[in-house]
Image (cartoon, rainbow, N blue to C red):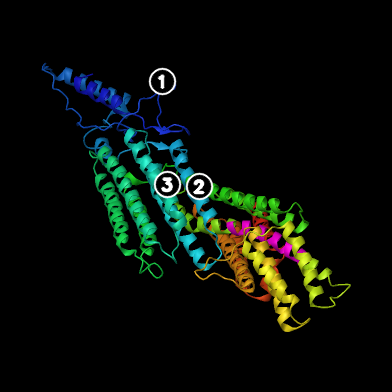
Amino acid sequence: MSSHERHLSSSSVSSQTPLKKTHSHGSIYQGNEESQPKLKLFENPLAHNRRKYSVTPPIPSPIHEISGPINIARKQSYDKSIENQYDDRKVDPFSKDDAEEEMFETPEFRRYEETTNMELFYDLFFVANLTTFNDVHDVNEVDALKSYAGFFCILWFLWLQVSLFDVRFVTDSILERIGKACQFGVMIGLAIVGPDFNSSNQKPGAFRSLAIILMFSRLVLSFQYSVILYHVWYYKNSKLPLFLVVVANVIAALIYFGTFFGFSEETSKTGKVFIVWYVTAILETAVNIAISSKWKVLSFRGSHLVQRMTLLTLIILGEGIIGVSKSIADIAEQEEKWTAPLILTIVSAVGIIYFLYMLYFDWLNRSQFGSIRQQIWAFLHFPFHLALVFLVEGAAQFIRWRKVVEVINQVSKQYVDQFKNIPAVDSLDLKTRLANVTQIIFEKFPPEFTQTFTDTQRALFNIGNTTLGSIEQLGNITTLFSTVQDSLFDNFGIDPPDSDNAVTDPNEEWNENIRVLALVFTYFFLASGLTLILMNILHALSRPQMTRADKLRSAVNFILSITLLGLAGISNTDAGFAFAQGAGVLPSVAGVYFFVMLLGYTKLIW
């Protein structure tokens, strides 16, 4: 074998470095298990080292052989036998013209099949923010509903932007840990401004702080992408896409900073600058996805993006379980009596969450289903998660409402029983009996506010000092009932919307509580229908090909979804009000989801 052939053979063997794919769940760094890896300032995210040199041309031999016709014939025969024996090494895979050009064009990054500990730790901040916002804000009016959706949009797209970086380029280094610490600080900042986030009453200080926080988060991301840009600097066609992502994050940061000047006391009620945040979040995500679809260096193929989305779905379902548990705890704190309709409502709430869990993961295609389809699938998780949040929140609220309705019916029966056999002889007798019943109720369910006692005493005084059976007396009796009912709502954590003008009329407060019930009824059924529709779309995107049975199931599911959406339209009707007060709200939705689940398990015969 000549020196040139020996060089080609050794070069092809030594240059073929296998690409690494990490399977560890708990550690980013893959090294010797017996030794503690050293933390570096920079950690190369590439699966192979950069080659800063080209293949060295073969060194010509200083010995020149002079051969005759016989030797030439022998050499050709020898070369031919070598060529047949080492056919796969005939061309150097790292020659300047072929493999090395490809290697310099597209780098290979380490891929992690499972979520790392650092990513899971970041998810804890998402959970904390969502839980805190749920505890502080009651979804009891349309403006509160908009604020809830708006804050969730900001939180979700922030989590998504960080996750889009982590699933492709996550490493463990000093700089990466500093970047993660900054992102943790961003989450803490959201937790600070979250209680004051109200799109209908914008506090300039809170909204300006949020603009700075969002700007800072994008600057951190631009820095993290810049570090990756440094590592791929010697690869062709890799600098431009990463540079575009860096620029996109910088532009987004500047836009967020620009909104800082749009919040003031004059525009706190009518300002719409915050809408720029939602538009920017959607556009920057679309740009990131578009760039990753065009350039291979930013591709999500082989990443654990699907697992990240499924984990976030589990987090939101877990938030629903927390809400249901809190509702049960509030009921147990007030009363130990558990009726069959209440138990059915609780079981249905848990069943809804469980059926959603089974449907989502049973319909999930865990294999890779195309980079572009995967990105669309991930992006559609925003409306899905938003609908899911309102669905589980509504389920938790209806548990409280079921108990409140039962208690109010019991209280009403107590008042009626006082006069069923022996009617009141005069106004003073009527006042005394009503006062006794009210006292028994307040001993069992103590009022939360002193104003309740004041309103009750005033109503009883007016009842005793008006003509028996007069319209004025009937009005005061209605006021007394409304006061007691409002107190019961307060006991079970159902509050009317906050208002600049305090509501002093118990009858008006009762009407506001009824409007809250109508709102919860509306968004619960809207969310239940949209959740089912979006789960079907996600299922279709994750499957390479839909069978005839799959298409039929999807059609049936779509009809059921439209039915659930249609129920939201009867919230302000008498039939809707009667249905909302009954025990069939949660069981009806649970029954639909259970049927969908059974339909998915049924093998249709054609």
Q: Eyeballing the image, is 481 above or below 248? A: below
Residue mark closest to the camera, 2 vs 1: 2
- Could you tell me which quadrant the N terminus lies in? top left
Q: The disc labelled 3 sits on which kind of residue?
A: Ile
Residue 199 in the image, given as x and y percentages of width and height: 43, 64
- Residue beneath the point at 38% across and 42% down: 168
Residue mark closest to the camera, 3 vs 2: 3
- Could you tell me which quadrant the C terminus lies in? bottom right
Q: Eyeballing the image, is 186 above or below 533? A: above
Q: Which residue is mark 3?
A: 188
Q: Work out how far the residue at label 3 is from the one at label 2, CA to CA, in angstroms.
A: 12 Å
Residue 555 in the image, given as x and y percentages of width and height: 59, 63
Q: The disc labelled 1 sits on which kind of residue?
A: Ser
Q: State the residue in front, 208 or 160.
A: 208
Q: State the residue in front, 27 or 334.
A: 334
Q: Does the image show residue 579?
A: yes
Q: State the residue in front, 510 or 453.
A: 453
Residue bounds of the magenta highlight:
393-411
Which mark sits nearer the N-terminus, 3 or 1?
1
Q: Which mark is residue 127?
A: 2
